[in-house]
Image (tube, rainbow, N blue to C red):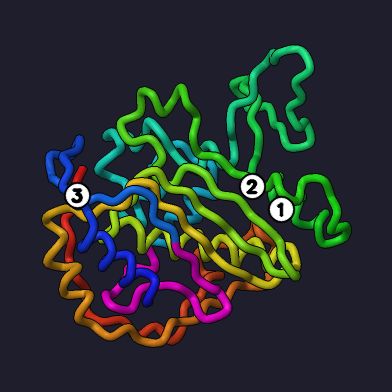
Protein backbone atom coordinates (compact mmCIF):
# COMPACT_ATOMS: atom_id res chain seq x y z
CA UNK A 1 0.00 0.00 0.00
CA UNK A 2 1.64 3.17 -1.24
CA UNK A 3 0.41 5.43 1.59
CA UNK A 4 2.06 3.22 4.21
CA UNK A 5 5.33 2.88 2.31
CA UNK A 6 5.39 6.67 1.86
CA UNK A 7 5.05 7.04 5.64
CA UNK A 8 7.95 4.66 6.23
CA UNK A 9 10.15 6.51 3.72
CA UNK A 10 9.28 9.90 5.21
CA UNK A 11 10.22 8.92 8.75
CA UNK A 12 13.38 7.15 7.59
CA UNK A 13 14.48 10.33 5.81
CA UNK A 14 13.23 12.99 8.26
CA UNK A 15 13.07 11.35 11.67
CA UNK A 16 15.14 12.62 14.58
CA UNK A 17 16.60 10.22 17.12
CA UNK A 18 14.81 10.24 20.47
CA UNK A 19 14.89 8.26 23.68
CA UNK A 20 11.62 7.15 25.32
CA UNK A 21 10.13 5.14 28.18
CA UNK A 22 10.91 1.75 26.52
CA UNK A 23 14.69 2.19 26.48
CA UNK A 24 14.76 1.56 22.70
CA UNK A 25 15.49 4.74 20.72
CA UNK A 26 13.32 5.83 17.81
CA UNK A 27 13.42 7.86 14.63
CA UNK A 28 10.51 10.23 15.18
CA UNK A 29 8.63 12.95 13.27
CA UNK A 30 5.89 15.31 14.42
CA UNK A 31 2.52 15.30 12.72
CA UNK A 32 1.99 12.93 9.77
CA UNK A 33 -1.29 12.61 7.84
CA UNK A 34 -2.54 10.21 5.15
CA UNK A 35 -5.85 8.79 3.97
CA UNK A 36 -7.08 5.81 1.96
CA UNK A 37 -10.21 5.17 -0.11
CA UNK A 38 -11.96 2.08 1.24
CA UNK A 39 -13.57 1.45 -2.14
CA UNK A 40 -10.16 0.58 -3.57
CA UNK A 41 -9.90 -2.51 -1.37
CA UNK A 42 -9.41 -3.39 2.25
CA UNK A 43 -6.19 -1.66 3.46
CA UNK A 44 -4.39 -4.66 4.92
CA UNK A 45 -0.65 -4.50 4.20
CA UNK A 46 0.61 -6.86 1.52
CA UNK A 47 4.34 -6.07 1.80
CA UNK A 48 4.37 -8.33 4.85
CA UNK A 49 1.86 -10.87 6.11
CA UNK A 50 -0.55 -9.42 8.66
CA UNK A 51 -2.21 -11.56 11.33
CA UNK A 52 -5.76 -10.69 10.36
CA UNK A 53 -7.46 -13.00 12.86
CA UNK A 54 -5.76 -11.23 15.77
CA UNK A 55 -6.86 -7.88 14.37
CA UNK A 56 -10.52 -8.94 14.20
CA UNK A 57 -10.46 -10.47 17.69
CA UNK A 58 -8.96 -7.22 18.99
CA UNK A 59 -11.70 -5.12 17.37
CA UNK A 60 -14.46 -7.29 18.83
CA UNK A 61 -12.76 -6.98 22.22
CA UNK A 62 -12.91 -3.19 21.90
CA UNK A 63 -16.59 -3.39 20.98
CA UNK A 64 -17.34 -5.66 23.95
CA UNK A 65 -16.56 -2.82 26.35
CA UNK A 66 -14.52 -5.11 28.60
CA UNK A 67 -11.77 -3.63 30.77
CA UNK A 68 -9.77 -6.88 30.93
CA UNK A 69 -8.33 -9.38 28.44
CA UNK A 70 -9.45 -12.59 30.12
CA UNK A 71 -11.28 -13.74 26.99
CA UNK A 72 -9.11 -11.95 24.42
CA UNK A 73 -5.90 -13.69 25.52
CA UNK A 74 -7.49 -17.05 24.57
CA UNK A 75 -7.50 -15.80 20.96
CA UNK A 76 -4.40 -13.59 20.74
CA UNK A 77 -1.53 -12.55 23.01
CA UNK A 78 -1.11 -9.03 21.60
CA UNK A 79 -2.19 -7.30 24.84
CA UNK A 80 -0.53 -9.63 27.35
CA UNK A 81 2.53 -7.40 27.85
CA UNK A 82 0.40 -4.64 29.40
CA UNK A 83 -2.00 -6.69 31.55
CA UNK A 84 -1.59 -8.21 34.99
CA UNK A 85 -1.82 -11.95 35.67
CA UNK A 86 -5.61 -11.78 35.92
CA UNK A 87 -5.94 -9.94 32.62
CA UNK A 88 -6.71 -6.49 34.02
CA UNK A 89 -5.52 -3.39 32.19
CA UNK A 90 -5.01 0.10 33.56
CA UNK A 91 -6.59 1.40 30.35
CA UNK A 92 -8.86 -0.49 27.94
CA UNK A 93 -10.07 1.22 24.78
CA UNK A 94 -13.45 -0.48 24.61
CA UNK A 95 -14.24 0.29 28.24
CA UNK A 96 -14.35 3.97 27.29
CA UNK A 97 -15.89 3.37 23.83
CA UNK A 98 -18.90 1.61 25.35
CA UNK A 99 -18.82 2.65 29.04
CA UNK A 100 -17.39 6.14 29.40
CA UNK A 101 -17.91 7.36 33.01
CA UNK A 102 -20.61 10.00 33.48
CA UNK A 103 -20.54 12.28 36.55
CA UNK A 104 -23.26 11.64 39.08
CA UNK A 105 -23.67 15.35 39.64
CA UNK A 106 -22.47 17.78 36.98
CA UNK A 107 -22.15 21.52 36.96
CA UNK A 108 -25.21 23.71 36.57
CA UNK A 109 -26.40 23.73 32.97
CA UNK A 110 -24.63 20.53 31.90
CA UNK A 111 -26.51 17.77 30.08
CA UNK A 112 -25.38 14.17 29.73
CA UNK A 113 -27.21 12.51 26.82
CA UNK A 114 -29.46 10.29 28.93
CA UNK A 115 -30.61 8.36 25.84
CA UNK A 116 -27.21 6.62 25.77
CA UNK A 117 -26.45 6.55 29.51
CA UNK A 118 -26.61 3.24 31.36
CA UNK A 119 -26.36 2.47 35.07
CA UNK A 120 -24.11 -0.50 35.83
CA UNK A 121 -24.49 -2.94 38.71
CA UNK A 122 -21.91 -0.97 40.67
CA UNK A 123 -24.09 2.13 40.37
CA UNK A 124 -21.63 3.84 38.01
CA UNK A 125 -23.33 5.72 35.17
CA UNK A 126 -21.68 5.24 31.76
CA UNK A 127 -22.18 6.54 28.22
CA UNK A 128 -22.17 4.21 25.17
CA UNK A 129 -20.32 6.21 22.52
CA UNK A 130 -20.68 3.56 19.80
CA UNK A 131 -24.47 3.37 20.27
CA UNK A 132 -24.55 7.18 20.03
CA UNK A 133 -22.64 7.04 16.72
CA UNK A 134 -24.95 4.39 15.26
CA UNK A 135 -28.11 6.25 16.28
CA UNK A 136 -26.75 9.54 14.94
CA UNK A 137 -25.84 7.97 11.60
CA UNK A 138 -29.32 6.50 11.31
CA UNK A 139 -30.76 9.95 12.02
CA UNK A 140 -28.55 11.46 9.30
CA UNK A 141 -29.81 8.84 6.85
CA UNK A 142 -33.35 10.14 7.40
CA UNK A 143 -32.49 13.80 8.01
CA UNK A 144 -29.14 14.99 6.61
CA UNK A 145 -29.53 18.25 8.53
CA UNK A 146 -29.53 16.65 11.98
CA UNK A 147 -27.59 18.88 14.43
CA UNK A 148 -25.19 16.10 15.46
CA UNK A 149 -23.73 15.44 12.01
CA UNK A 150 -20.40 17.11 12.93
CA UNK A 151 -20.37 15.80 16.50
CA UNK A 152 -19.78 12.09 15.90
CA UNK A 153 -16.69 11.82 18.09
CA UNK A 154 -15.53 8.82 20.12
CA UNK A 155 -12.91 9.30 22.84
CA UNK A 156 -10.82 6.61 24.52
CA UNK A 157 -8.97 9.25 26.54
CA UNK A 158 -9.96 9.93 30.12
CA UNK A 159 -7.49 12.54 31.46
CA UNK A 160 -7.49 11.26 35.06
CA UNK A 161 -6.89 7.68 33.90
CA UNK A 162 -4.25 8.66 31.34
CA UNK A 163 -2.26 10.56 33.96
CA UNK A 164 -1.58 7.30 35.85
CA UNK A 165 -1.93 4.51 33.27
CA UNK A 166 0.96 2.25 32.29
CA UNK A 167 -0.10 2.69 28.66
CA UNK A 168 -2.81 5.31 28.03
CA UNK A 169 -4.51 5.09 24.63
CA UNK A 170 -2.29 5.69 21.61
CA UNK A 171 -5.18 5.93 19.12
CA UNK A 172 -7.19 8.05 21.49
CA UNK A 173 -10.03 9.63 19.49
CA UNK A 174 -11.84 9.16 16.19
CA UNK A 175 -14.72 10.85 14.47
CA UNK A 176 -17.07 10.17 11.56
CA UNK A 177 -18.34 12.30 8.72
CA UNK A 178 -20.92 11.58 6.00
CA UNK A 179 -20.27 13.10 2.59
CA UNK A 180 -22.28 12.26 -0.55
CA UNK A 181 -23.71 9.11 1.03
CA UNK A 182 -20.30 7.80 2.10
CA UNK A 183 -19.15 7.22 5.68
CA UNK A 184 -15.66 8.53 6.45
CA UNK A 185 -13.56 8.08 9.59
CA UNK A 186 -10.68 10.16 10.94
CA UNK A 187 -8.42 8.69 13.62
CA UNK A 188 -6.09 10.81 15.75
CA UNK A 189 -3.18 8.98 17.32
CA UNK A 190 -0.82 10.58 19.85
CA UNK A 191 1.90 7.94 19.33
CA UNK A 192 2.36 5.53 16.46
CA UNK A 193 4.75 2.56 16.19
CA UNK A 194 5.07 2.42 12.40
CA UNK A 195 6.32 -1.14 12.07
CA UNK A 196 3.90 -2.88 14.43
CA UNK A 197 1.03 -0.64 15.54
CA UNK A 198 0.11 1.51 12.55
CA UNK A 199 -0.68 -1.38 10.16
CA UNK A 200 -3.10 -2.79 12.77
CA UNK A 201 -4.65 0.61 13.52
CA UNK A 202 -5.20 1.36 9.84
CA UNK A 203 -6.91 -1.95 9.16
CA UNK A 204 -8.86 -2.06 12.44
CA UNK A 205 -10.51 1.35 12.09
CA UNK A 206 -11.15 0.78 8.39
CA UNK A 207 -13.00 -2.42 9.27
CA UNK A 208 -14.96 -0.64 12.00
CA UNK A 209 -15.95 2.05 9.48
CA UNK A 210 -17.15 -0.59 7.03
CA UNK A 211 -19.16 -2.36 9.74
CA UNK A 212 -20.83 0.89 10.81
CA UNK A 213 -21.52 1.85 7.19
CA UNK A 214 -23.28 -1.45 6.60
CA UNK A 215 -25.34 -1.08 9.78
CA UNK A 216 -26.51 2.44 8.95
CA UNK A 217 -27.04 2.23 5.18
CA UNK A 218 -24.06 4.20 3.89
CA UNK A 219 -21.28 3.28 1.51
CA UNK A 220 -17.76 3.13 2.96
CA UNK A 221 -15.80 6.27 2.18
CA UNK A 222 -12.29 7.22 3.29
CA UNK A 223 -10.20 6.40 6.31
CA UNK A 224 -7.98 9.32 7.36
CA UNK A 225 -5.22 9.14 9.96
CA UNK A 226 -3.22 11.76 11.83
CA UNK A 227 -0.22 10.51 13.81
CA UNK A 228 1.19 13.11 16.21
CA UNK A 229 4.42 11.26 17.09
CA UNK A 230 5.13 8.88 14.21
CA UNK A 231 8.16 6.78 14.99
CA UNK A 232 10.31 3.83 14.00
CA UNK A 233 12.13 1.90 16.73
CA UNK A 234 15.81 1.46 15.94
CA UNK A 235 15.50 -2.33 16.03
CA UNK A 236 12.74 -2.15 13.38
CA UNK A 237 14.74 -0.22 10.77
CA UNK A 238 16.17 -3.22 8.92
CA UNK A 239 12.78 -4.93 8.68
CA UNK A 240 11.15 -1.80 7.30
CA UNK A 241 13.96 -1.38 4.79
CA UNK A 242 13.15 -4.91 3.62
CA UNK A 243 9.50 -3.96 3.24
CA UNK A 244 10.44 -0.99 1.09
CA UNK A 245 12.04 -3.36 -1.43
CA UNK A 246 8.84 -5.39 -1.83
CA UNK A 247 6.25 -4.65 -4.49
CA UNK A 248 2.74 -4.27 -3.02
CA UNK A 249 0.13 -6.77 -4.17
CA UNK A 250 -3.53 -5.93 -4.98
CA UNK A 251 -5.55 -5.16 -1.85
CA UNK A 252 -7.84 -7.88 -0.50
CA UNK A 253 -11.59 -7.67 0.02
CA UNK A 254 -13.78 -7.86 3.11
CA UNK A 255 -17.29 -9.23 3.40
CA UNK A 256 -19.48 -8.62 6.45
CA UNK A 257 -22.47 -10.81 7.29
CA UNK A 258 -25.90 -9.27 6.91
CA UNK A 259 -26.59 -9.08 10.65
CA UNK A 260 -27.26 -6.29 13.17
CA UNK A 261 -24.04 -4.61 14.31
CA UNK A 262 -24.18 -5.80 17.93
CA UNK A 263 -24.80 -9.40 16.82
CA UNK A 264 -21.76 -9.66 14.58
CA UNK A 265 -19.11 -12.17 15.67
CA UNK A 266 -15.64 -13.11 14.49
CA UNK A 267 -16.89 -15.61 11.90
CA UNK A 268 -19.04 -12.92 10.23
CA UNK A 269 -15.97 -11.05 8.96
CA UNK A 270 -14.42 -12.76 5.92
CA UNK A 271 -11.20 -11.73 4.19
CA UNK A 272 -10.65 -12.84 0.58
CA UNK A 273 -7.98 -12.40 -2.10
CA UNK A 274 -5.20 -11.65 0.40
CA UNK A 275 -1.80 -12.28 -1.21
CA UNK A 276 0.83 -10.97 1.22
CA UNK A 277 4.60 -11.14 1.08
CA UNK A 278 6.28 -13.22 3.82
CA UNK A 279 6.13 -12.31 7.52
CA UNK A 280 8.68 -9.84 8.90
CA UNK A 281 9.22 -10.23 12.65
CA UNK A 282 9.44 -7.09 14.78
CA UNK A 283 10.14 -7.12 18.51
CA UNK A 284 7.61 -5.25 20.69
CA UNK A 285 9.05 -2.39 22.76
CA UNK A 286 7.17 -2.50 26.07
Residue at point 19% right, 81% down?
A: 245
Ranked by sequence position, the earlier of labels 1 and 3 is 3
Mark identifier at residue 130: 2
* Magenta residues, start to end: 34-54
Could you tell me residue 55's position as x and y percent? 40, 61
Could you tell me residue 157's position as x and y percent? 49, 35
Count of residue discs:
3
In front: label 1 or label 3 = 3
- Give the quarter of the image for residue 4: bottom left
Residue with the mark numbered 3 = 16
Tell me whether circle 1 and circle 3 mark residues in contact (CB < 8 Å). Answer: no
Residue 256 forms part of the magenta stretch: no
Residue at point 17% right, 43% down?
A: 18
Residue at point 75% right, 70% down?
A: 180
Could you tell me residue 88's position as x and y percent? 37, 34
Tell me whether circle 1 and circle 2 mark residues in contact (CB < 8 Å). Answer: yes
Quote the CA–CA distance across marks 1 and 2.
Answer: 6 Å
Quote the CA–CA distance across marks 3 and 2.
Answer: 37 Å
Residue with the mark numbered 1 = 134
Q: In this view, does 91 lie above or below 207?
A: above
Q: Which residue lies furthest to the front in this view?
A: 14
Q: Nearer the viewer, residue 157 or 144?
A: 144
Quote the CA–CA distance across marks 1 and 3.
Answer: 41 Å
Residue 50 forms part of the magenta stretch: yes
Amino acid sequence: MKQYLDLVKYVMENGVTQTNRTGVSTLSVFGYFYKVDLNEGFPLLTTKKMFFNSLVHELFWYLSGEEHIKDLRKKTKIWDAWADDEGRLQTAYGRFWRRFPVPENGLDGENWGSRWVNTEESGQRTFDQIAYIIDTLKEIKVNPDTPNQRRMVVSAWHPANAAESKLPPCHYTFCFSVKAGRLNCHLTQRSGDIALGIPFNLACYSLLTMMLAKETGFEPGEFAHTIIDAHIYENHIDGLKEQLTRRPMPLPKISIADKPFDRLVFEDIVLTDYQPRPVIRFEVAV
